[in-house]
Structures are given as C-alpha cells and as structure tokens.
Image (tube, rainbow, N blue to C red):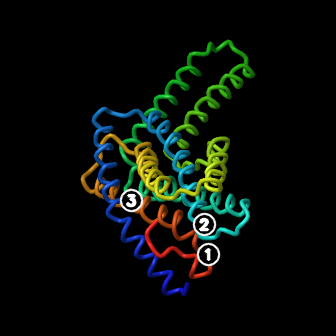
C-alpha cells in the first residue's frame, strides 16, 4: 500500500475510534467524580492500577498480535510474539503511565493539596523524630545517641521515599515485571492460535481508560478546580485514543508491506 493510502487508512481508523474513546473518557470522569465523593484512598487507586494496567497489556498484546497475524499469515509465531509484546508494553506504558503523568504535572496535581498534605505528614514525622531524640536521657553515651539518630533518620528517609514513589511515574513492566511481562507474552500466544481483534481491542480500550484514570487518581489532591477536571478529560482522551489505535492498528500494520495484506475494512 502506498504511503498516502496508509495515512488515509490510519486517519479513518482514528476518526472511527474518536467517538467511542470520548464516550469512555466521559464515563471515566463520571466514575472519577464518584470516587472523589466516597472518597477513594490512595492505596485503593494503586490497587486498581495494578489490576487494570496488566489487563490492558494482555488484551493489547492479543489485539496487536492478532492484527499482524491476520494480515501477515506467513510469519513465524516468534515474530508474532515480538510484535505483540513490543506493541503492548510500549504503547500501554505510554497510554497508562506516561501521558497521565504528564497531565498530572501540567495540571499541577503534584504540587496541589495532596502534595501539601504529604509534606504535612513528613513534617509531623520529622517532629516526632526530633521529639524522640530530645527524649533520650543525657547520660547516654555519644555512640548511643548517634546510633539512635541514624535509625530514626533512616525511618524518615524511607517515609519520604515512599511518598515520592506514591505520586511519581509508575512503570508497570518494571514495578510489576513478574505480572505484566508474562501477560504480554500470553496475549501474543493466544493471538497465534485465535487471532481475534474486535473483542480484545474494545476490551483493552476500556481497561486503558480505567488504568489511566487510576494513575491520575493516585496524584489528585483533595481540591480540584473545574479547569483541572476539563484537563483530566482531555488527557484521558489522548491517553487512550492515540496510543490504543497506534498499538492495535498502526504498529502491527507497519510490518505489512503488501497492499493485498492491508485490511480494506474496519476491524
């Protein structure tokens, strides 16, 4: 297929998926508002991310590998696995982690009330540490004072590290490598034997919305302005629309050169 034909096909797919993705983003905002009213603990948001992101990777690998398998039938299954793995891990990380994190930074969530609340927690922890040091009897030896000081400062350092990790950028294939990477391989294997595209694609678009939503929820503060809500919807839409279409449609078909192998209808 000529370059112009490829671009035309890709644009048509992006256009077809835009309404569905917008509806998913609006639905995600609705559930985000619900979670804000409950309210949802930060650790619960992290748990939801650890569920939805691996599921997204699995279905994305199935859809990516299946699209390539259907239109490049002579390819060895190892190549199909590689296409499925790279396409799912790379694009899912961009969709669920990188774009939401960029949105969080630009929307000011990492310096909002949530961050100030964490700073307050750290200040309270430091005050507790100082109180513990002051409460040590004066007759204690210098070495004992130094030992106690090192211990409490290590505790304070661990607390700060945990807070920094909690609102930072999460990479599923690194943080949960034992779960995410095998699921990407499993998705490719399933596509080798049953190359479905419609169900995995629709499923992983929804899971991507939830994973991106969970990542943003981990960084949101207690007070969110109307402008920030609008920004969340925009970044949620972008996090799902472009990466998911690229992963399932554009990426696998980049390796299909013959015009006869390219699909002539929507998948």
Residue 255, placed above or below residue 66: below
Give the class, few, some or many, for how many residues have Cα within 10 Å of label 1's Cα (few <14, many ≥20): some
Mark 1 and mark 3 in contact? Answer it, CB < 8 Å: no
Q: x%, y% of residue 129?
A: 55, 25
Mark 3 and mark 2 in contact? Answer it, CB < 8 Å: no
From the image, tell me which residue sits under label 1: 256
In the picture, the quarter occupied by the N terminus is bottom right
Residue 112, placed above or below residue 152: below
Q: x%, y% of residue 161?
A: 58, 39
- What's the distance in space between the residues labelled 3 and 2, CA to CA? 28 Å
Q: Mark 3, mark 2: which one is toward the viewer?
A: 2
In the image: residue 255, left or right of residue 235: right
Q: x%, y% of residue 108?
A: 38, 54
Q: Which mark is residue 68?
A: 2
**Labels in figure, total:** 3
Residue 140, placed above or below residue 66: above
Q: Nearer the viewer, residue 223 or 248?
A: 248
**Residue shown at 52%/30% (left/top)?**
126
In the image: residue 51, left or right of residue 258: left
Q: Quadrant of residue 80?
A: bottom right
- What's the distance in space between the residues labelled 2 and 1, CA to CA? 8 Å
From the image, tell me which residue sits under label 3: 235
Give the class, few, some or many, for how many residues have Cα within 10 Å of label 3's Cα (few <14, many ≥20): many
**Residue shown at 49%/57% (left/top)?**
95
Q: Which mark is residue 176?
A: none
Marked residue nearer the N-terminal end (1 or 3): 3
Q: Nearer the viewer, residue 38 or 202?
A: 202
Mark 2 and mark 1 in contact? Answer it, CB < 8 Å: yes
Marked residue nearer the N-terminal end (3 or 2): 2
């Amino acid at each position: 297929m000529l370059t112009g034909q490829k671009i035309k096909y890709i644009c048509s797919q992006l256009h077809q998926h835009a309404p569905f993705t917008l509806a998913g983003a609006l639905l995600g905002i609705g559930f985000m508002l619900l979670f804000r009213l409950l309210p949802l603990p930060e650790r619960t948001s992290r748990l939801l991310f650890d569920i939805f992101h691996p599921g997204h990777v699995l279905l994305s690998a199935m859809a990516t590998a299946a699209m390539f398998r259907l239109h490049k039938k002579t390819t060895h299954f190892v190549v199909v696995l590689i296409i499925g793995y790279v396409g799912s891990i790379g694009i899912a990380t961009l969709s669920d982690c990188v774009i939401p994190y960029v949105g969080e930074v630009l929307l000011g969530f990492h310096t909002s009330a949530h961050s100030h609340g964490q700073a307050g927690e750290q200040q309270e922890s430091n005050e507790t540490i100082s109180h513990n040091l002051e409460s040590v009897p004066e007759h204690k030896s210098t070495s004992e004072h130094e030992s106690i000081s090192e211990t409490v400062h290590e505790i304070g350092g661990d607390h700060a590290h945990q807070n920094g990790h909690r609102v930072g950028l999460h990479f599923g294939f690194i943080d949960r490598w034992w779960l995410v990477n095998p699921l990407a391989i499993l998705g490719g294997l399933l596509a080798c034997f049953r190359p479905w595209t419609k169900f995995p694609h629709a499923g992983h678009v929804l899971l991507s919305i939830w994973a991106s939503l969970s990542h943003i929820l981990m960084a949101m503060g207690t007070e969110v302005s109307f402008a920030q809500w609008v920004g969340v919807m925009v970044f949620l839409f972008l996090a799902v629309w472009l990466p998911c279409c690229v992963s399932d449609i554009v990426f696998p078909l980049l390796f299909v050169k013959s015009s006869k192998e390219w699909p002539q209808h929507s998948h």
